[in-house]
Amino acid sequence: MQVKQYSYYFISFVTLISIILASTNYIIDPYSLFQTKRVSGFNDKKPAAENRTKLFKPYNVVNIKPETIIVGNSRPEMGLNPLSECWPKGMGTIYNLTFPGLGTYEQIRALFHAVSTGNVKNILLGVDFIDFLQSRNNNNTIFWPKRNNEFLDRLLVDEQRLSNDNYSFAKLQDYSSSLFSLNALSDSLYTLMSQSENSTDRTSLGFNPANDFKEMIHYEGSWVLFKQKQDLLKQIFSTKNKSIYDSQKWSIEFEAIKRTIQLAEEKGIKITLFINPYHYSYLEVIRNSGYWNEFENFKKTLIETVNKYGKNHVEIWDFSVYSNYSVSVIPKKNSPEPQSNWFWEPAHYKAELGERMLTDIFNTNCITEQKENVGTKLNNIDINSYLNQQQKRRSILLKKLN
Amino acid sequence: MLFNSYIFIFAFLPITFSIYFILAKYKSGEMAISFLVIASLFFYGWWNPIYLALIILSISVNYFVGEAIVRSRTISKNRHTKALFISGLLFNLGLLAYFKYANFIIENFNLFFGFTSQINEIILPLAISFFTFQQIAYLVDTYKGITKEFKFTHYVLFVTFFPQLIAGPIVHHKEMLPQFLKLDNMKPNLDNIVIGANIFALGLFKKVVLADGIAQYSSPVFNAALTGEPLSLFVAWGGALAYTFQLYFDFSGYSDMAIGIARMFGIRLPLNFFSPYKSLSIIEFWRRWHITLSRFLRDYVYFSLGGNRRGKTRRYINLFTTMLLGGLWHGAGWTFILWGGLHGMYLVTNHAWHYIQQRLKLEGLNQLSLWRVFSWFLTFVSVVNGWVFFRAENFDAALVILRGMYGFDGVALPNAITARLGGLSSIISDLGITTFIGGGSQFIFTYLWLALLMFIAFTLPNTQQIMDSLHKEESEQGDALFNQGLFHNTLKFRYSMGWAFIMSGALVIAIFGMTRVSEFLYFQF
């Protein structure tokens, strides 16, 4: 073969291979970005989407235009299933717009983004004490700052809810890199090879079925998950001098909640603000590290914020309590696997508990057996007496456990 | 501008290539060379235009000193010539000392004498070690009458020719200039373009797919070592080996890309890597690793110190000193000096062993397969140990890794793996192997990647061997394990549909590899 002929082949193959590889990425759609049809046993499970929620969820929510969104971090992501039967009728399409590891500011920016699509009528907003803790010495001058990062570029609106100029370019970049990249290609192959029942997944509605946890528990036991998280929690809460407020008795996180409530009032959107449930071992870490008062102050400030800015459209629920759900045996190495645990590990609750939370909030009757409430609605409640009751409940339940 | 960037591949390279040959054809060769100089300076200035001033100053001074040396030689004023040469040398070393070593020198001066002197942080100009060494070599060659240059643009092109400017190969004036001026090279040649593009594709694949692919498994281990966290045996070896292959595929890939791009312009750059990890001795390793630097150190440092002309002891001292300086050339830090010193010791030991072998008439050992495998293993492990110092942020971090590699901090496997081994897990436990929680998939992928890269680096032919039917370069390598590489007859490049498919596939996958889909590793918190 002559060099001329070789170069024709070379150029033709470059073009052909590029097209084939990009088409493969589009069809398999490893990050659920293009929302190509999910085919069971082929591309139904999306294991590679696990670390790409910040990539695909902002675009998915624009395409799906849900009426109801769940906002928060990884806890509601694996706790609240949009396809659960415990949702009341009339909620429309429900999308789980939660982001593992994302702080409150960015979660709320994602909420603004979803609302800007024009369809959202209901929001379930899960908040976490740990996301509100910051250095006591912080001295914020602006409580609603303008921030720039890759994730925020993917949102339709900026912090003032005005059109985001970077959106189109970010979208072009994300879509092209998900077609023409080796990451996407290796993730496509990974997707093809990971279609077993317990493969890691994010559903088309953004829910995390926690299949990776199931797999770990199957082989290693749930003690591994509990131990890993307990060690981490102890490390995090060992840092002293943290507070939910900065030196000006306010914070970016509370400002984010305030702005969300104001948005709901302005648009007539119903918001259910809830504090995520924790396993009692998590609550004990908070208590033992000296942050219990701060934890109670967190709840009080949330109620005050709701009462001040959102009387009409906002409900507030507390699920972070000692209850028969949260107080259960901590799994130990070489011990039998505990029965009926409502938690994967101290910080993440199972979707079964999420369903019971939904029946609390919406008073639906999807659970046939008689059930104890998971949490308490805090609107119009005497907060101090409620917190005292909690202390008593703790004593009783821990005594029973031991 | 990096070779593995879109701006380089889709804009800079095709534009520069086209204009260069158009100017050569329709204007003049000199104009084409001037354009290539401007393009190369633009390429360099893309990072930080401020350092253009530095490189231009360095080039100008060296050019004029070189020219003065040539003129001085012709009127045979020996003392004057020497003074010119020494002043040129001092200028280059001074520049290097200030930009690369000033912070290091002052830091250590303060440490030893308890002073608190400080200077503003000096940012290391890109490629200063490369262009300075290249110009020192030019001055030495000019002083010795081996080469001379009277045309400024030619000299600038010799230093700044963009394929080799940033990371070598380090070239000699006498091997480059005749190529630039050759009329045939001023016309685009389809053979050169295709062969160059294919060598570039292989290099890009090595850098983007292989080196960047394994990089994610070395950094976490070295970062953990920096915090003092004890590392178990397999984790420490995983990190050290990952870096060993990352560095090789990164640097040799970059060299391949440089050689490929230059070939597209009709220029042949010297070989820089030749399967170094197949070496059966450290002496052989340095004939195969960063060959042009070894050549420079041998010709301009080792020989200047006296080489092997003054007896064995002096030869060993010269060898050790050369490697120590070679270590320092790589970076201003004690870990680099230590790395150089370690290789100096390796080389001295290797030469001493050769001497003993000769005296005891044990050369026959070198033919035994088992001995060859042992020699290869010892060489490779010694090199890996050296890379630990080369990569670690400081001496303590290097020691943490080495402690782990030699089992001082235990032997452990991820719980996720042992839990899936069924009955084997109790045997593992009886052997004293403990388990740790988390990091299971990281562990598995580290060793899967390593298995692939070891197979490639230890057994397959290298770029030069694959391409040698159409791109033959002189090489002085000796014996090695799988010297020719397995499948060496099959893996010989020729113009065929099969090779067009392989090479275009490598290019497309490498270009795809240049884009990363943003990822957020969160580990469920």
Image (tube, coloured by chain):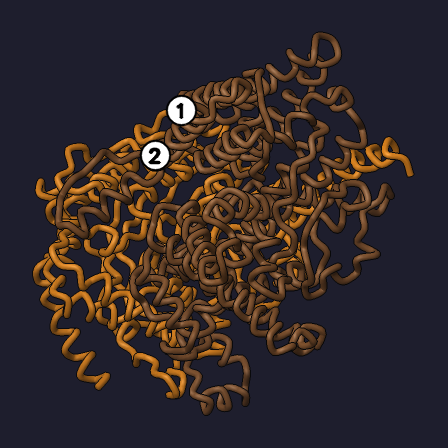
- Give yes or no for contact between labels 2 and 1 (Cβ–Cβ under 8 Å): yes
Q: Mark 2 or mark 1: which comes first in sequence?
A: 1
Residue A297 pos. (x, y %): 12, 54
Q: Residue at x 35, y 52 (%)?
A: A101
Quadrant in the rendering for residue A147: top left
Looking at this view, is B257 or A395 the one in front?
A: B257
Looking at this view, is A262 or B164 the one in front?
A: B164
Q: Residue at x 49, y 77 (%)?
A: A218
- Side of B189 relative to B304 (left or right): right
- Specify the subunit that label 2 lies on: B
Give the number of callouts. Answer: 2
Looking at this view, is B352 or B373 the one in front?
A: B352
Residue B54, disc:
1
- Specify the subunit that label 1 lies on: B
Quarter of the image that includes the C terminus of chain B: bottom left
Tag 2: residue type?
Answer: Phe
Q: Which chain is orange?
A: A
Residue B110 pos. (x, y %): 18, 47
| Mark 2 surroundings within 10 Å by alpha-carbon count, few (fewer than 14), some (14 through 19), many (20 or more) | some
Tag 2's secondary structure? helix
Q: Residue at x 32, y 41 (%)?
A: B101
Q: Is residue A128 above or below residue A256?
A: below
Residue at the spot of label 2: B99
Residue B395 pos. (x, y %): 32, 60
Q: Which chain is brown?
A: B
Q: Residue at x 36, y 58 (%)?
A: B223
Tag 1's secondary structure? helix
| Mark 1 surroundings within 10 Å by alpha-carbon count, few (fewer than 14), some (14 through 19), many (20 or more) | some
Tag 1: residue type?
Answer: Leu
- Side of A72 relative to B340 (left or right): left
Quadrant in the rendering for residue A213: bottom left
